[in-house]
Image (tube, rainbow, N blue to C red):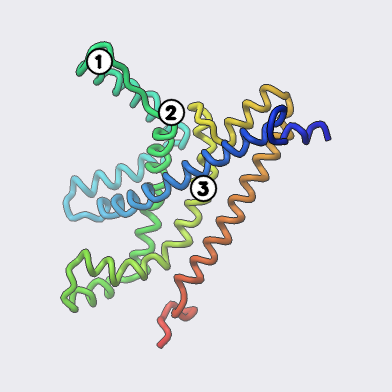
């Protein structure tokens, strides 16, 4: 019972700090995911572009960020970008100093990694839609952007939801990596609590329960979105009359 009091709110407990860490974790994931989805479409477009330099850049981007460990990407971005910014600041205004927020560094690093995998989700969804839908939209005289918005995207989203749902779960868990650059997420707060109380099992168990709850809720939300996106379609994928 004395151990459980360490999770209490107020003085003497770590409940307040854990809730703030949970808020940081959710804020980072929610801020990163839209950026990662937008980049996923951009990377897919680059990988399938007709211009060879653009296509090579897209392929190199996807290969690089799928190959590097996420924590290495984060550390390189945080520390090397910090050094580059300071070098530029010294050249532009001697004596000045610039710093990168750990939150922004985490957002950018995780967006780069998730979008590399997200481009594969977009590619698979595009293939599932089929080239015929693009040709049908063009036959109706729709401009490419309007055709994509009105014809392709609603169908593509239905096929992409499972893949993007899995990436959201991966992103939720990968936010724990930002603890290495001192962002006060769930994992960082747990480490501070453990260093103070010497109760590793209690705090790792507590944040483990929170992560399981987040993933469970996310999975249920994903199922609901998939059911909503599949309304009007048969099991074979054809639309009901």
Q: In front: mark 3 or mark 1?
A: 1
- The residue at 36%/66% (across/down) is 156
- Residue at the image position 63 percent from the left and 35 percent from the top: 16
Q: Residue furthest right?
A: 1
Nearer the viewer's eye, disc 2 or disc 1?
1
Which residue in the protein does label 1 denote?
90
Measure how far apart labels 2 and 1 are at the Cα level. Answer: 22 Å
* Mark 1 neighbour density, 10 Å: few (under 14) some (14–19) many (20 or more): some
Determine the residue positioned at 48% across, 61% down.
162
On the picture, is 9 further left or further right than 151?
A: right
Q: Residue furthest top?
A: 95
Q: Earlier in the sequence, mark 3 or mark 2?
A: 2
Q: In front here: 2 or 34?
A: 2
Describe the element under mark 3 as helix, strand or loop: helix
State the mark number for residue 170.
Answer: 3
Instruction: Report x, y in % for residue 176.
Output: 54, 37
Separation of residues labelled 3 and 2 (CA atoms)? 19 Å
The answer to whether 108 is drawn above or below residue 231 in the figure is above
Assign a secondary structure to mark 2: helix
222 sits left or right of 80 in the view: right
**Disc 2 target residue:** 75
């Amino acid at each position: 019972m004395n151990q459980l009091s360490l999770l209490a709110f107020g003085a003497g407990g770590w409940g307040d700090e854990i809730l703030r860490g949970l808020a940081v974790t959710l804020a980072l994931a929610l801020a990163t995911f839209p950026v990662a989805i937008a980049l996923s479409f951009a990377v897919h477009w680059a990988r399938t572009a007709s211009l060879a330099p653009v296509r090579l850049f897209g392929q190199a981007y996807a290969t690089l960020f799928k190959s590097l460990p996420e924590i290495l990407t984060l550390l390189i971005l945080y520390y090397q970008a910090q050094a580059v910014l300071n070098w530029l600041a010294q050249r532009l205004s001697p004596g000045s100093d610039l710093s990168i927020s750990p939150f922004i560094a985490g957002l950018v690093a995780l967006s780069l990694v998730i979008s590399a995998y997200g481009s594969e989700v977009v590619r698979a969804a595009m293939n599932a839609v089929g080239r015929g839908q693009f040709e049908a939209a063009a036959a109706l005289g729709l401009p490419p952007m309007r055709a994509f918005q009105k014809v392709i995207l609603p169908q593509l989203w239905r096929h992409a939801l499972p893949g993007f749902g899995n990436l959201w779960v991966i992103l939720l868990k990968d936010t724990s990596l930002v603890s290495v650059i001192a962002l006060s997420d769930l994992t960082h707060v747990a480490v501070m609590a453990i260093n103070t109380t010497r109760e590793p099992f209690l705090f790792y168990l507590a944040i483990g329960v929170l992560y399981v709850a987040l993933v469970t809720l996310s999975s249920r939300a994903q199922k609901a979105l998939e059911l909503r996106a599949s309304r009007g379609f048969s099991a074979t994928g054809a639309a009901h009359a």
